[in-house]
């Protein structure tokens, strides 16, 4: 079951909005009566997804807001706008995923590591006080069992790995960072009624190369509540 989904403000981050767990999660939350904010970099896809969900559920409280996790400036601007416009936040879902060329320029970090971890980390920190003030609330970080192959080296954190499978290694590293983020956040928020979860949702085939998350009926929580 989905908690906190009636008369609440729900934020969900989806890099692909017309398929996969992102669309399924947003649809089910809207059916529960939640106010759902879809945040993605593509205005065309974001608006189309919000319109489709409103049409299918009859819930008019499904909105699109622009967010590009590959830009930390965009993350900060998004958080500022959201906090100004939305007084409630009970559920934050960090679900965007990237497994493309790690050498594509961002803010000096590899693209998968910034989109999958750093952008979500910053956004979560910027919204944490709002989550605390609206408690009970929760943060859900979509990780992956690929975290088992992750290797985090402090001196090279966020830099593209070398080697033939650098994009996949970077993805694994970012998923390990997701799990560690969830664990540390859960520890720090004990006693605040803000709970944090990392989840490996299983397999599906959205277009994030051949390696991407997700099947909603095969959810496995990776601890940290």
Image (tube, rainbow, N blue to C red):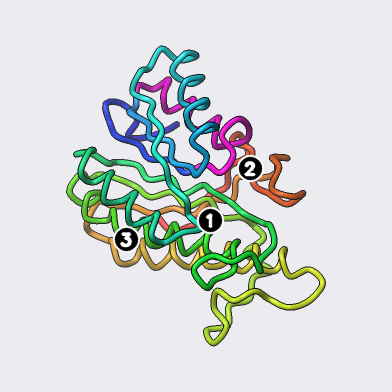
Looking at the figure, which quarter contains the C terminus?
Answer: bottom left
221 left or right of 89 in image: right
User: Residue at the bottom extreme?
Assistant: 155
Q: Secondary structure at mark 2?
A: loop
Residue at label 1? 222
4 left or right of 105 in image: left
Residue 124 or 101: which is nearer the viewer? Answer: 101
122 lies above or below 194: below
Q: Secondary structure at mark 1?
A: loop
- Contact (Cβ within 8 Å) of mark 3 with mark 1: no
- Which numbered disc, 3 or 2, marks the residue that appears first in the sequence? 3
Residue at label 2? 214
Residue at label 3? 125
Q: Which residues are magenta?
A: 14-33
95 lies above or below 35: below
Q: Residue 158 in the image: x percent, y percent?
A: 55, 74
Q: Does the magenta segment cover residue 22?
A: yes
Residue shown at the point (66%, 69%) measured from the top left: 103
Spatial CA distance of label 2 from label 1 is 14 Å
Q: Secondary structure at mark 3?
A: helix
Spatial CA distance of label 3 from label 1 is 21 Å
């Amino acid at each position: 079951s989905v908690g906190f989904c009636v008369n609440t403000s729900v934020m969900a981050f989806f890099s692909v909005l017309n398929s996969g767990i992102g669309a399924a999660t947003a649809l089910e939350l809207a059916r529960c009566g939640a106010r759902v904010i879809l945040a993605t970099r593509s205005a065309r896809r974001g608006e189309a997804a919000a319109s489709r969900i409103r049409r299918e559920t009859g819930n008019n409280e499904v909105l699109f807001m622009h967010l590009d996790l590959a830009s930390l400036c965009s993350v900060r601007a998004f958080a500022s706008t959201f906090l100004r416009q939305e007084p409630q936040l009970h559920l934050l879902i960090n679900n965007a995923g990237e497994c493309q060329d790690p050498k594509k320029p961002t803010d000096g970090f590899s693209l998968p590591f910034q989109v999958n971890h750093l952008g979500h980390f910053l956004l979560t920190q910027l919204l944490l006080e709002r989550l605390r003030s609206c408690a009970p609330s929760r943060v859900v970080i979509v990780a992956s069992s690929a975290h088992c192959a992750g290797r985090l080296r402090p001196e090279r954190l966020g830099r593209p790995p070398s080697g033939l499978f650098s994009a996949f290694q970077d993805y694994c590293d970012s998923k390990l960072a997701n799990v560690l983020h969830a664990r540390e956040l859960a520890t720090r928020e004990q006693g605040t009624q803000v709970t944090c979860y990392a989840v490996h949702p299983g397999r599906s085939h959205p277009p994030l190369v051949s390696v991407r998350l997700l099947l909603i009926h095969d959810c496995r929580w990776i601890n940290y509540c």
